[in-house]
Image: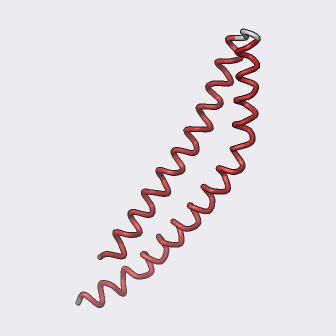
Amino acid sequence: MRFIFKMVILPLSLLTAFLALMLKLTLNLSAFVLALPMLYIFGCGLYTLYCREWTQFLILFVAEFGCFLLIVAGTAIVEAVERFSEWLTEL
């Protein structure tokens, strides 16, 4: 009975492992893609801080924080899928 259960779970386990791998690769790529705009936004933020343009600085700060939240949320999703995949393989 246990063997039949494992045979039924095997395709789902393989699918979640593939999904975890693809999400991890996508997260790494998106981190590289977002790194340059984040650096540019940070530099512009420092310049607006120097020029005392407070509203522009606030807009850039929110944009930088939004990019940071995108990377953190992506990491949380990847970790959740990896844990689910490991849980399925342990069944």
Residue 8 occupies which quadrant of the picture?
A: bottom left
For the C terminus, the image quarter is bottom left
**Left or right of 60 on screen, residue 86:** left
x 51%, y 65%: residue: 20
**Left or right of 59 on screen, residue 71:** left
Q: Which residue is situated farthest in the left direction here?
A: 1
x 44%, y 64%: residue: 82
Where 18 falls versus 23 (above or below)? Answer: below
Where 35 falls versus 77 (above or below)? Answer: above
x 30%, y 89%: residue: 4
Front-most of 73 and 45? 45
x 63%, y 56%: residue: 28
Front-most of 48 and 6? 48
Q: Which residue is situated farthest in the top direction here?
A: 52
Give the colouring mode of the picture: secondary structure
**Left or right of 12 on screen, residue 62:** right
The percent coordinates of residue 64 (x first, y second) are 64, 31
